[in-house]
Amino acid sequence: MAPAAPPPPGLEDALAVARRVAGYDPKADIALLERAAQTAAEAHATQTRDNGDPYITHPVAVANILADYRLDAATIATALLHDVAEDTALGLKEIEKRFGAEVARLVDGVTKLTRLELQSERTKQAENLRKLVLAMSEDIRVLLVKLADRLHNMRTLQFVPQSARRQKTARETIEIFAPLAERIGMDALKTELETLSFQELHPEARQTIAARLTYLRGQSANLIKEIEHDLKRVLAQHGIKALDVTGREKSPYSIWLKMQKKNVAFEALSDVMAFRVTVEDRAACYAALGAVHDAYRVVPGRFKDYISTPKTNGYQSLHTGVTVPERRNAKIEVQIRTREMHEVAENGVAAHWIYKQGPEGNTSAAGNRKRYPWVRALLDILENAEGAQDFLDHTKLELHRDQVFCFSPKGDLIELPRGATPVDFAYEVHSQVGDSCVGAKVNGKIVPLRHQLENGDQVEIITARGGQPNPAWERFVVTGKARARIRRFVHARQKEEHRESGRAAIVKAFRQEGLDASEKLLEGALKPLRQAGLEELYAAVGAGSLSPKEVLHAAVPELRIPPRAANPLPLVQRRGRLGASPLLGRPDRAGAGKPAVSPGLPVTGLVSGMPYHFAGCCHPLPGERILGIVTTGKGVTIHAADCHTLENFAATPERFLDIDWDEASAAHRVGRIVVETRARNSALAALTETVAQNDGAVSGLKVQHRDDDSIEVLLDVEVTDLRHLERIMAALRAPADNLRVERMRG
């Protein structure tokens, strides 16, 4: 009799998770969990992680993180299986067959995202975020599994060998996943994600702040204990029963963030300690607040009531800042809440499983959107965004803003990012209200549409039938939904203008040849020009990617001009027949030879030694199409293909030279950005620091306009390519103080 095969690595640990779930949920389907444990252990049996451990240790760790929140059996099974469909031979259909439709749907939602940290292209990151938003809108448990997965990956990040990959994972975590954790109220998980990311991204800053905290701890060894005792004494004197009073230092990351935001040194920060007071009920919260304010001097502007006006993630607490003179004039933050409020503050959506074995309402798409309005806001951005990259940038804006709370005339509460305007408010009410907005009243007074709203404002939107978004609104709106909707309208209008101008240009070109540009005749040009229909053809001509003559020659081939026998441009290695030539389209490559590549040149298509320079009107960058203009005695001027200056050369197509970027060249190029930011002492320093943090270098800076409210700055930034410049622009758009960020063309 052959000996029994040894169990796969990690099986016992996986089965232990099932026993944990049975301990807190006797009704859970333990057989399902045991099958999931067995399947995961067998599927990952031959795989290892970066640190050499069996791969099964990862899904087991993810499942244990979720078991800490006492989540349901389907979620725990998903955690055990979340990498199986992606990394093993076991497909999604087999998972559904073995574990049912619910687990298969959750696994599918998570596995679409499991390789996010290995993607290098920014567009893939944007596409994965889009998938995550759609998946979590259908079932919020997808996000819970993904956050637990990311948390364990961050806890073991030090074992990843490539520094660039560690940096990318940490940056993605702090920009996307930590804010998502905050949005569902999981503060403890969010704080750990931020701490681990900060340690990887800014190790020196973290070490400096940690050393400073250690020093202060030594100087005031018992200060936190002394203040805890003081608070208990004050509450007892006022007859308030405190269930718990605890103090802590704020995390190095939150301290660093405040230093960056206020542009101050560590020594200038007054509140690096926070104290939490837990009481029995809501009424006791306000009584405790009164006692604290009676005993200590209040720091102005630091009181916030999140009990009467909870955050959208369900967070409730009273926050206040006070000075404790008896304890070295310490300025502290005090948070007052009930025990259940504290569970929600720490665990967010997961707290509902702890108390009720399931979330309030349900995990359906409709339930998620009702319970989590920010999910609906992200879906609105997704609907209106022009593409995955646009969605990524707007989503980051949506996730990283502080909130203000305003009211409609009917008393409905509308939550908006700090710095929001009446236009943002209008789009939050409804997209059509935003589109038709023509004015606004705040607290009964008419205000400009770029007026910044404050907490408690009552906002009335004035609309007009047939109203349309104003492109200028994009300069001051701050919500991703409003910006995406305005940009979509602008693009649609531009496309319509392109169609009209393209149609007129085609009609003119045909008339010059004595022909009528009938639809039947033009339809013959669609296939050779690779256009889906006549509307697309008109738009392509209007946008400049096709010329009217190209359409004419495609529709009536006998009118095509034969290529010249002689080369009118002896200095240029030609890449095709330039005479057919259009302003912005690629010339016909029929009969074209291979492009000349000159060693050391950043572009291909030039003869070695030929003088060239980059146009100052458009500052072309690698990653976008370029064209050359040949000028006698001056060589070649290289323009971006969409540069408006090229229109001046439309009558002399023989001067156009088809060139391209040399991918082997690693030289940096200069992109020009115009930034409108709020006037403050640290404005210019903040801009240059943001550029530097995103691996750019400011080579030129000019203040073009300054008034009491804002500064308009022209920045010349050294970047590697167009995508690098777009990343810097996205980072510059994130702070609320930056009102407008645009690429300067001309």
Image (spheres, grey):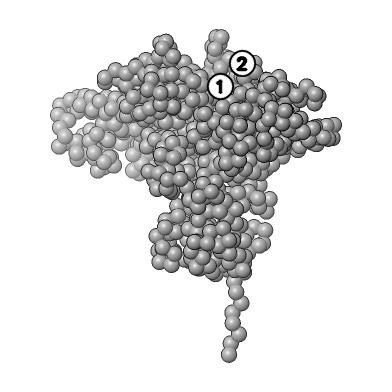
Please give left or right for residue 639 compared with residue 700 in the image: left
Based on the displayed image, in which of its 4 quarters is residue 445 positioned? top left
Q: Amino acid at mark 2?
A: Arg
Tell me, yes or no, whether the two marked residues, 1 and 2, touch with CB atoms within 8 Å.
Answer: yes
Please give left or right for residue 524 compared with residue 719 in the image: left
Sequence order check: which comes first, mark 1 or mark 2? 2
Q: Is residue 90 above or below residue 572?
A: below
The percent position of residue 447, horizontal first and vertical second, equals: 43, 12
Please give left or right for residue 201 compared with residue 372 in the image: right
Residues packed near mark 2 inside 10 Å, few (<14), some (14 to 19) or many (20 plus): few
Quadrant containing the N terminus is bottom right
Residue at x-position 85% and y-position 31%: 219
**How many labels were placed on the picture?**
2
Residue designated by label 1: 737
Local secondary structure at mark 1? loop
Local secondary structure at mark 2? loop
Q: Which mark is residue 525?
A: none
Task: Tell which residue pokes out farthest to the right in this image.
Answer: 219
Residue designated by label 2: 680
